[in-house]
Image (cartoon, grey):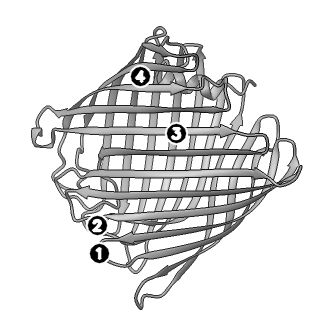
Amino acid sequence: MKKSLLALISSVAASPALFSSPLLSIGEHADLYLEVGGSVAYTDNLTLDENNELDDYRFILQPGLALEFGRGLTNLNGGINAQYGFVRYADNTNFDTELWNVTGDLSFNGPRYTAGVRGGYDEKQQNENDVNAVQTLVLQKRAYAGANVRYSISEKIALGVAGDFQNITYDGGNNVDRDIYAVPVDVFYELTPKLDATAGFRYRQTDVSEGFDADDYFYNVGLTGALTEKFSTNFKVGYQTRDFTGDRGSEGTMTLLSASTFDMTERTTLKFTLDRDFATGGQGSSIERSRAAATLFYLITPRISADITGSYILSDYEASTREDDTYLVRLGSSYLINELLSLNAFYTYRDNSSNLNGASYTENLVQVGANFRY
């Protein structure tokens, strides 16, 4: 199967970026695009409350500009995308808001190394299981930046070093702001031209405005690349400890980070993930989170695609008896009308079963939308 199937499906599902002409060409290697997205959604539980469920219609209009440079023709490639979203509700107009989403990335390929930088700022108005909110919507603001480099030491051995930073703040609910720093270091050994074995270490620091700060130490081994012509994977498995400030004791767990792709047929691709890692909840609580998810993509025609996703998350709140079992099913489809316009629609069902009073909920969400790019 051609490796471009997922890229083609993604382009049909999101926007006709790979096919549209730019609004403005700048020099020989840069293009400026106008992007406009819009959607109408209905949910039967807007704030994800166990009781007093609110149903409502949500309308989003999101214009923006995208600057892309390099065109894959030079060693330096990247882009900047800025969008401003207008969010309105039919009944609960007190939740009306505007949201920024700005992203940027830059990559460079050298003779013995690859390097990249990325950063952005986004705002999200959506409640989550671990974010405290009762009959309200929480606005999450996130600023982030990162850099990575991979250097070939010899014909078969390479060294990879990266750094990531996130600043997360909340408006609404009883949630704490936090800064997250992560530094992973990996050594790659070439098993085949398409598959590497890895050995690595990740240090992650989470500083919360209230509560216990945490330092994570993850020692791991793994594989990255293609195991067969149709199956590729990127996984790390190992042991992780989480140490807290103050007199609180440390925690440890087996950790797995994985993402795999199986090209079943020329039209069908399966992507699945298995993860187990520490997380920090909205109120600063430490969570041991295990997740399994799978998405099946099917290319009906070169212009029409469909997908189905199922996932399960087990959230074990440390220093607490709370446990959450979260199930999700999503059915989606998209249609590329022409080089400028695409349509999409999906249905999502979410169910959170918690032993904490008031934390369980179900939600049915239906959304239809369109994307224009010129």
Residue type at mark 4 is Asn
The disc, 4 or 1, on the residue closer to the chain's N-terminal end is: 1
Q: Determine which quarter of the picture holds residue 76.
A: top right
Q: Mark 1 or mark 3, which has the lower sequence index?
A: 3
Task: Point out the image quarter for the N terminus.
Answer: top right
Circle 3 residue? 105
Residue contact between numbered discs 3 and 4, judged by CB atoms under 8 Å = no
Specify whether 243 is left or right of 274.
left
Q: Tag 3's secondary structure?
A: strand
> For the image shown, how many numbered marks are present on the structure?
4
Is label 1 in a helix, a strand or a loop? loop
Comparing marks 2 and 3, which lies closer to the viewer? 3
Which mark is first along the chain, 3 or 2? 3
Would you call the spot at circle 3 few (<14 residues within 10 Å), some (14-19), or many (20 or more)?
some
Residue 214 vertical placement versus 292 (above, below): below
* Image quarter of the C terminus: top left
Residue at the image position 31 percent from the left and 45 percent from the top: 124
Task: Of the two numbered discs 2 and 4 on the same chain, state the one appearing first in sequence.
Answer: 2
- Marks 2/1 in contact by CB < 8 Å: the verdict is yes
Disc 3 residue type?
Answer: Asp
Q: Report which residue position mark 1 lands on.
A: 210
Structural distance between the alpha carbons of marks 1 and 3: 32 Å
* Contact check, label 4 and label 1, Cβ < 8 Å: no
Q: Which residue is mark 2?
A: 176
Hey, what amino acid is under mark 1? Glu
In the image, 350 versus 195, the foreground residue is 195
Q: Residues within 10 Å of mark 2 (few under 14, many from 20)?
A: many
Residue 274: image location, x then y, percent: 61, 54
- From the viewer's perspective, is 135 left or right of 163? left
Q: CA distance from mark 2 to mark 4?
A: 35 Å
- How many residues crowd around disc 4 within 10 Å: few (fewer than 14), some, or many (20 or more)? many
Q: Nearer the viewer, mark 1 or mark 3?
A: 3
